[in-house]
Image: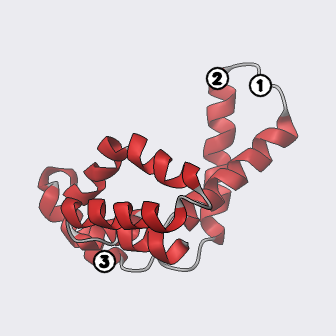
């Protein structure tokens, strides 16, 4: 099933992705009908993904780093429980982010190519 989903988000165009989604639904709806329905209902949001070049898309759909960060934040928040103010929560998250970043030693795959695409797409956002 994961391979079938991969054909959707690795498609070169929106039309190819729609075709892959239709094929996915035909193949998997009998067993997992909720998956394709979720994709169809959120399709207008998903297709914005195809506005980006392939190098950026490759970095976006790899969410392991994001999931790891969220898990680390939940762990810190769960241990504290109650916060006197929103600022205290933000300070705690900032400090934990500083600690978490020290543990990250593996580079993000394809990051240099994605960074070059970001620099072209948003030239005023980068200071070289």
The quadrant of the picture occupied by the C terminus is: bottom left
Residue picked out by circle 3: 112
- The answer to whether residue 127 shows anywhere in this view is no
- Number of the front mark, 1 or 3: 3
| Residue at mark 2 to residue at mark 1: CA–CA distance | 7 Å
- The answer to whether 10 is drawn above or below residue 87 in the figure is below
Asked whether, in this view, residue 37 is left or right of residue 121, the answer is: right
* Crowding near the residue tagged with mark 1, few <14, some 14–19, many ≥20 C-alpha atoms within 10 Å: few
Residue picked out by circle 1: 83
- Quarter location, residue 12: bottom left
Asked whether, in this view, residue 31 is left or right of residue 37, the answer is: right
Element carrying mark 3: helix
Q: Nearer the viewer, residue 25 or 90?
A: 25
- Number of the front mark, 2 or 3: 3
Which numbered disc flags the more N-terminal residue, 2 or 3? 2
Which numbered disc flags the more N-terminal residue, 1 or 3? 1
Residue picked out by circle 2: 86
| Residue at mark 1 to residue at mark 3: CA–CA distance | 39 Å
- The answer to whether 44 is drawn above or below residue 14 in the figure is above
Disc 2 + disc 1, Cβ < 8 Å: yes
The quadrant of the picture occupied by the N terminus is: bottom right
Asked whether, in this view, residue 17 is left or right of residue 90, the answer is: left
Q: Nearer the viewer, residue 104 or 25?
A: 25
| Residue at mark 2 to residue at mark 3: CA–CA distance | 36 Å
Kindly identify which numbered label has been placed on residue 64.
Answer: none
Total label count? 3
Element carrying mark 1: loop
Tell me which residue sits at (58%, 78%) in the image: 105
Tell me which residue sits at (43%, 80%) in the image: 109
């Amino acid at each position: 099933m994961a391979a079938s989903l991969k054909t959707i988000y690795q498609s070169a165009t929106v039309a190819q992705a729609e075709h892959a989604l239709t094929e996915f639904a035909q193949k998997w709806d009998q067993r997992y009908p909720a998956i394709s329905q979720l994709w169809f209902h959120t399709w207008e949001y998903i297709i914005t993904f195809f506005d980006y070049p392939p190098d950026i898309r490759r970095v976006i759909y790899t969410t392991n780093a994001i999931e790891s960060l969220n898990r680390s934040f939940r762990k810190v928040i769960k241990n504290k429980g109650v916060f006197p103010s929103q600022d205290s929560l933000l300070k705690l998250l900032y400090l934990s982010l500083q600690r978490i970043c020290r543990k990250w030693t593996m580079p993000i795959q394809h990051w240099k190519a994605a960074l070059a695409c970001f620099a072209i797409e948003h030239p005023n956002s980068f200071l070289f």
